[in-house]
Image (spheres, rainbow, N blue to C red):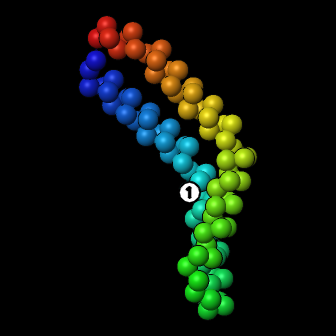
Amino acid sequence: MNTQQVLDIGTGALVMCAKVAGPFLVVVLAIGIVIGLLQSVTQLQEPTLTFVPKLVGAAVVIAVSGNWMLASLVSYGHDLIARVPQLLKG
């Protein structure tokens, strides 16, 4: 296994992590901004107010795109396992 193959595997893993984590991060960020804006407008500074909407948003993301996320991770795992003989040959 040479340096380029290691870099390809690492880059692919980082891209896969970004793809899977992206929907969660976008939804939670959007909910956090909206709740923060509402808190600043109403001057209601309750730290636990943002927890439940973010939890619901994350659950919705899992319900909507969980199948795609799991399929992407399984596909990436299969591709890595399929590359093992090629990587061991050098």
Circle 1 residues within 10 Å: few <14, some 14–19, many ≥20: few
**Image quadrant in which you'd find residue 36:** bottom right
The three-letter amino acid code for the residue at tag 1 is Leu
Vertical order, 23 against 10 (above or below): below
The secondary element bearing badge 1 is classed as helix
Q: Position of residue 83 (x, y in %)?
A: 43, 15
* Residue 42, x across and y down, in percent: 66, 90
Q: Residue at x 67, y 59 (%)?
A: 57
For the point 59% across and 54% down, which residue is it? 24
Q: Write the residue at 48% across / 14% down.
A: 82
Check the picture and name the quadrant holding the C terminus. Answer: top left
Q: Is residue 11 above or below residue 46?
A: above
Residue hosting label 1: 25
Relative image position of residue 65 (x, y in whole percent): 69, 44
> In the rendered picture of this protein, how many numbered marks are placed on residues?
1
For the residue pair 20 and 63, the one nearer the viewer reads as: 63
Indicate the quadrant containing the N terminus: top left, top right, bottom left or bottom right: top left
Q: Residue at x 52, y 27 (%)?
A: 76
Is residue 50 in view?
A: yes
Left-right relation of 10 to 81 = left
Which is nearer the eye, 40 or 50?
A: 50
Residue reaching furthest bottom? 43
Q: Is residue 32 rendered to the left or right of residue 57?
A: left
Relative to 57, does residue 82 appear above or below in the rendering?
A: above
Q: Residue 69, image x and y in percent?
A: 62, 38
Observer able to see residue 30: no
